[in-house]
């Protein structure tokens, strides 16, 4: 399930009026944003620009969640600031079809997929079923390994903080994480650890 944090209550009706494969959480003020981003992990933030400074701080704290900013009026300064830390910028009044297209684009970009299949070297990863295949042979993964692989495949060639990974896996064990990483590396995924900044990176492969 694609998890979205919506920080603009005026847009909620767009999601309520249709059925999507999205799980929507709503924050109507800064306190709710702090609580939800602390307690949960999201795949996309949809944020009114009035909360820019708050999300600027989240990004400085190594929150790598894609962010779509919503502005009340077009402002070139706000647009530039949005793309410094975010991934998209849209101005009200919202054209529903355009807005949903941008949200869907972020979903697709997250996994960089075509027809719901992600190709990495000789691996095929089915996003919906979360099944991994190599040369047409299904590779068995534990739920935790699947979650970790999904995280890396959604951030190809981008460093991911170890603490962020711990939060996603709901563990704080270095040993457990090393076991998971070791298995993925043995399978053929090139995951490197940067000790100086405590991050892991899945190197770019033959990705389609």
Image (spheres, grey):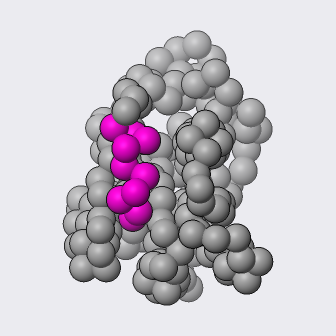
Q: Position of residue 195 (x, y in %)?
A: 53, 79
Q: Is residue 17 magenta?
A: no
Q: Quadrant of the C terminus?
A: top right
> Residue shown at 61%/45% (left/top)?
95
Residue 148 percent coordinates (x, y): 41, 49
The residues colored magenta run 7-16
Asked whether residue 123 is in view, the answer is no
Q: Look at 60% across and 25% down and name the residue there.
A: 117
- What x and y, as percent, mark residue 116? 58, 25
Q: Is residue 92 above or below residue 54?
A: above
Residue 118 shows up from this direction? yes
Q: Is residue 45 above or below residue 130?
A: below
Q: Relative to the observer, which residue lies in front, 54 or 114? A: 54
Q: Is residue 6 left or right of residue 167?
A: right
Q: Is residue 157 left or right of residue 38?
A: right
User: Of helix, strand and loop, which mostly describes the magenta segment?
Assistant: helix
Nearest to the observer: residue 1 or residue 185: 1
Q: Is residue 85 left or right of residue 77?
A: left
Q: Pick the residue in front: 203 or 111.
A: 111
Residue 194 horizontal side relative to residue 184, left or right: right
Quadrant containing the N terminus is top left
The image quadrant of residue 177 is bottom left
Q: Residue furthest top?
A: 136
At 43% from the left and 41% from the top, the residue drawn is 14
Residue at horizontal 47 percent and vertical 66 percent from the top: 47
Is 183 placed above or below 31 here? above
Q: Nearer the viewer, residue 93 or 31?
A: 93
């Amino acid at each position: 399930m694609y998890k979205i944090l919506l920080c603009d209550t005026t847009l909620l009706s767009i999601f309520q009026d249709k059925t999507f494969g999205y799980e929507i959480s709503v924050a109507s003020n800064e306190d709710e944003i702090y609580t939800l981003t602390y307690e949960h992990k999201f795949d996309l933030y949809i944020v009114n620009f009035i909360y820019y400074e708050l999300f600027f701080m989240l990004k400085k704290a190594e929150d790598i969640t894609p962010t779509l900013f919503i502005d009340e009026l077009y402002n070139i300064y706000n647009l530039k600031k949005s793309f410094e830390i975010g991934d998209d910028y849209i101005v009200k009044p919202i054209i529903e079809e355009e807005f949903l297209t941008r949200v869907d684009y972020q979903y697709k970009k997250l996994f960089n997929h075509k027809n719901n299949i992600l190709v990495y070297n000789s691996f095929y990863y089915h996003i919906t079923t979360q099944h991994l295949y190599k040369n047409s042979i299904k590779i068995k993964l534990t739920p935790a390994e699947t979650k970790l692989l999904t995280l890396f495949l959604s951030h190809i060639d981008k460093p991911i903080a170890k603490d962020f990974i711990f939060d996603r896996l709901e563990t704080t064990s270095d040993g457990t994480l090393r076991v998971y990483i070791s298995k993925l590396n043995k399978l053929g995924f090139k995951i490197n650890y940067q000790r100086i900044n405590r991050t892991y990176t899945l190197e770019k492969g033959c990705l389609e």
